Structures are given as C-alpha cells and as structure tokens.
Amino acid sequence: DAGVTQSPTHLIKTRGQQVTLRCSPKSGHDTVSWYQQALGQGPQFIFQYYEEEERQRGNFPDRFSGHQFPNYSSELNVNALLLGDSALYLCASSGGQGYNEQFFGPGTRLTVL
Amino acid sequence: GQQLNQSPQSMFIQEGEDVSMNCTSSSIFNTWLWYKQDPGEGPVLLIALYKAGELTSNGRLTAQFGITRKDSFLNISASIPSDVGIYFCAGRRASGYALNFGKGTSLLVTP
C-alpha cells in the first residue's frame, strides 16, 4: 500500500520563475492538502482540495495555486518565485470528508536563488 | 493560520528517561494530532485525539486531549535513541479543514 508520494524531491529555481510540484495521495484517500514548512518552523497550511475544488485556503497570496485531478492527485503551482518561497513543501492526504487524520508525503525541497 | 505554543522547544535526555511535552492555544480545537518528523522527511502521524479528556496510547507514547480543548500533552516512556526527532502538535478547528501546527519540540536522546 503506497503512501503519499511527491515529486520532485528537490528543485532549484531563480527569482521570478514558476514551479509545479506534484502529489499522489495515499490509496483510498480523496482529499489533498498542501503545506509550506520553512526551516525551524511548523508546517503552514496553503490550501486543501476535495472533489477537484479548492475547499479552504490559508493566508497565502494568489501566486500560489493548485489543481486536483479526477484520480485525486494534485499539483501546487507557484508563480513569480521570491527568495522567501524557499521551503519544504508538504502534501498531505486524507480520506472521507477531510476530517480524518492527514498523512504526509516526504516533501519537495524548493530553493529559490 | 494560527501557530500553537509548543514547549519545551528542545529536550536533551538520556536513554530510558520519560519525556513530556505540551501544546497550548488560545482557540478551541476539535481534533489534536501529534506528529514526529525526522530530518529531510515528512511528518509521521503518531496519535490522533478527538474528544476532550481523551487519553490515547500508541506503544510507549501517550497523548491527552485537554478538557478545555485548548491544549494537549504527549508523553514518551522509556525513551530510546530512535525517538530522536522533532515532535509537532497540530490542531483542527470545527469550522475548518486546515491543521494548525506548533513550532515543534526537538528531542535528543543519548545512549
């Protein structure tokens, strides 16, 4: 039973560029949440997708957008990258209506130069 | 989102000792979760709590959902070297889906 998978594992971009991160949920899960984790901090909620729609959004600018596909996998897109976007981006999946426990993937380490 | 207040920030203990850490918030939460994160990895779910006053164990780990719904506690008994890592508490409000995380407690265990 595969857990949550994310790709790529590492990514280096320059300021102003765009990036797309990908996530496949745990088998049987239909809800995907994205979090940003800066060094030395706890994860910060970006948004959650359910039934291919953004169901809740955290305090992040519109440069952060996402998508969920019919097979429940998801993408996180970040436009006009800033140095401060450098972080570990975590995807978490959950089952049912999203009220269950959230299981995290290994993350994508994004470095913006 | 609101960050929870997690303490202590770090702990340095000897193998075999018991560990206690806690998490507090000014807001009420419906769900409390405890995660462990190793360097370069994603957080791993340890324990989930759903009712005020609930006490739940997972092996040597025991966590409690505070009766005020504004706090939670995690205890680790008889620590071993593989307990090393960062422990995060996370809470979810009844009105939303987001998990609000603390800043973590870094645990170091010496043999």
Image (cartoon, rainbow, N blue to C red):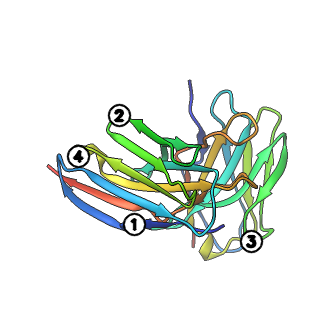
Residue A110 visible to an observer of this rendering: no
Cα separation, mark 2 vs mark 4, equals 15 Å
Name the mark nearer the viewer: 2 or 3: 2
State the image coordinates of residue B28 (x, y, percent, origin top left): 63, 60
- Horizontally, is B40 left or right of B2 in the view? left
- The residue where tag 1 is placed is B7
Disc assigned to residue B59: 2
Is label 2 in contact with label 3 (beta carbons under 8 Å)?
Answer: no
Q: Position of residue A93 (x, y in %)?
A: 65, 41
Of all chains, the one bearing label 1 is: B
B8 relative to B20, above or below: below
Classify 10 Å Cα crowding around label 3: few (below 14), some (14-19), many (20 and above): few
Q: Taking A68 as reference, is A17 above or below it?
A: below
Question: What subunit carries mark 3?
Answer: A
Disc 2 to disc 1: CB gap under 8 Å: no
Q: In the displayed image of the protein, which residue is found farthest to the left?
A: B111
Give whichever of discs 2 and 4 has the lower sequence position: 2
The image's mark for residue A80 is: 3
Residue beneath disc 4 = B81
Q: Mark 4 belongs to which amino acid?
A: Pro
Residue A44 or residue B75, whichever sits in front: B75
* Same-chain status of marks 2 and 4: yes
Q: Chain of mark 4?
A: B
Can marks 1 and 3 be said to lie on one chain? no
